[in-house]
Image (cartoon, rainbow, N blue to C red):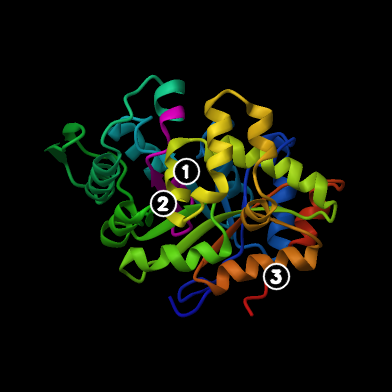
Amino acid sequence: MTDGTVNPVTGPRYGITVPFGGVGLDDHRRLYEDLVRLGYTDVWSAETDGTDGFTPLALAAAWTPSLQLGVAIIPAYTRGPALLATSVAAMAEAAPGKFTLGIGTSSDVIVSRWNGMEFTEPYKRVRDTIRFLRSALAGEKVDREYDTFSVHGFRLSRPVEQPPPIYLAALRPGMLRLAGREADGVILNWLSAEDVAVVKPELQADKPICARIFVCPSEDTDLVRSIARRMIAAYLNVEVYAEFHRWLGRAPALEAMWAAWQSGDRKGALEVIPDEVVDALLVHGSFAECREHVGRYVANGVDIPVMAVIPVGMALEEAIAGLAPPWSAD
């Protein structure tokens, strides 16, 4: 990449997470059109317990074809390989040259507890999924035994003229290095602007970095921190994220939260999350302060900052407009 925000093909990238909470998918067209008008370039979906990862992007492709589309992420476990390939191919056909696929392990909660599948060998599973998709999206007939699944005699009947870039969601060194070797980019989540400088060298390659950044444009600090503590507890007690933050060096700050959570003391777990952790992991303050904070992610190496906007005390539309790019990277 040429600098913190500039993609040599598309120019600066300014992303936001969709779909927006409290807004029906059928009412997203006006918001997508607002994003284009305000200067956002990207919309990135997710796939957890809300919508699937593809439908919000398919609507954006139809309504606002100038937007870049991405999904962060589709779990590597929850669709069979052939079904995943057809879903990716359909999105690539709907938005030629505009779609980026994000693949990741997800977590044991989503894979095992919610979908009843074994969360085993995550490193190999995402590696195998990337390799399979490379072959399938290239139009090859796939007949192969991978380490974590097998595919026999599959070929896409609708060839993909422009196979999408594949980004890998990665947290710790092993997966980050896999992203550097086999993916086209990396997706980061739940880290501070300063953490980016720790994570980036582990890629061992010059690959684009996409990061989801949680942003609450409010100067009611106590309220924002209360909201953020609930979010942090929900995520950082999931083992993959707990290990990530141990690796980042936050164990001393978070051990009390982990201990309280494990003992069943949910309220106590929230109370012991330090303010400095909250302020590092969730961007908040005035619009100008939020834009400056997002700019620090960019300055430290994020190429595609994707805000997950949490409006407090204001309409969603006001928050989106107030956070609109450009964001300073000074």
> What is the magenta range?
91-109
* Residue drawn at x 79%, y 59% as measured from the top left: 285
Q: Amino acid at mark 3?
A: Glu
- Would you call the spot at circle 2 few (<14 residues within 10 Å), some (14-19), or many (20 or more)? many
Q: Is residue 157 left or right of residue 300?
A: left
Q: Which residue is mark 3?
A: 292
Q: Is residue 80 left or right of residue 254?
A: left
Q: Is residue 143 left or right of residue 56?
A: left
Distance, label 3 to label 1, CA atoms, is 26 Å
The label nearer to you, 3 versus 1, is 1
Q: Which residue is mark 1?
A: 241
Is the N terminus in the top left, top right, bottom left or bottom right quadrant?
bottom left
Residue 35 placement: quadrant: bottom right
Q: Which residue is mark 2?
A: 171
* Residue drawn at x 71%, y 34% as measured from the top left: 24
* Residue drawn at x 86%, y 48% as measured from the top left: 314
x, y percent for residue 179: 32, 57
Asked if disc 1 and disc 2 are in contact, CB closer than 8 Å, the reply is yes
Is residue 102 highlighted in magenta?
A: yes
x, y percent for residue 115: 42, 22
